[in-house]
Amino acid sequence: MMSFEMNDRKKIGLGLTGFGVFFSFLGIIFFFDKGLLAMGNILFISGVTLTIGLKSSTQFFMKRSNFKGTISFGIGFFLVVIGWPIMGMFLETYGFVILFSGFWPTLAVFLQKIPVLGWLFQQPFFRSFFDRYRGKRVPV
């Protein structure tokens, strides 16, 4: 299948996304350092764009069902840049959850198939939580 081919652009995009998550994590650990948080956001957005392509990322972020998440993430990013990192990170987290909520069923299946941790996620409490979202479709 041609669409799942891992070319250099996608490898760089995944690397940028990983570094974006890493820098955001460091920014939170270092008491909401706005420089690290802003760098993490820029790297994350550019990594997602390189990984799935400009057209697909534009369609994903501008989809009507994702518009609330896009606005929240954008306002949160703006708040981080102007110097309000705690409020900005709360808005970004809310936007991130709204934007990527369609991927939770895929994540649930992945977590249940991990060799050691899969046992934990197959327990009745987690299984009932995951089964609520199993029938929904992935948005990409």
Image: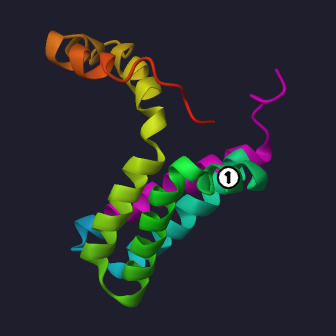
The answer to whether 2 appears left or right of 120 in the picture is right
Q: Residue at x 42, y 65 (%)?
A: 72
Residue toward you, 83 or 67: 67
Task: Left or right? Give the position of 86 relative to 43.
Answer: left
Which residue sits furthest left?
A: 125
Q: Which residues are magenta?
A: 1-26
Q: In the image as oriented, which residue stretches furthest toward the front?
A: 64
Question: Relative to residue 70, is residue 138 depicted above or below?
Answer: above
Splitting the image into 4 quarters, where does residue 118 fall? top left
Which residue is painted at 61% across and 51% down in the image?
63
Query: Mark 1: which amino acid?
Result: Ser
Residue drawn at point x = 15 percent, y = 17 percent: 125
Q: Residue furthest bottom?
A: 82
From this viewpoint, is residue 12 visible? no
Where residue 22 appears, x then y in whole percent? 41, 57
User: Percent from the top left, x then y, of residue 44?
Assistant: 53, 59
Q: Tell me which secondary structure the magenta stretch mostly adopts.
A: helix
Above or below 67: residue 111: above
**Is disc 1 placed on a helix, strand or loop?**
helix
Colour approach in the figure: rainbow
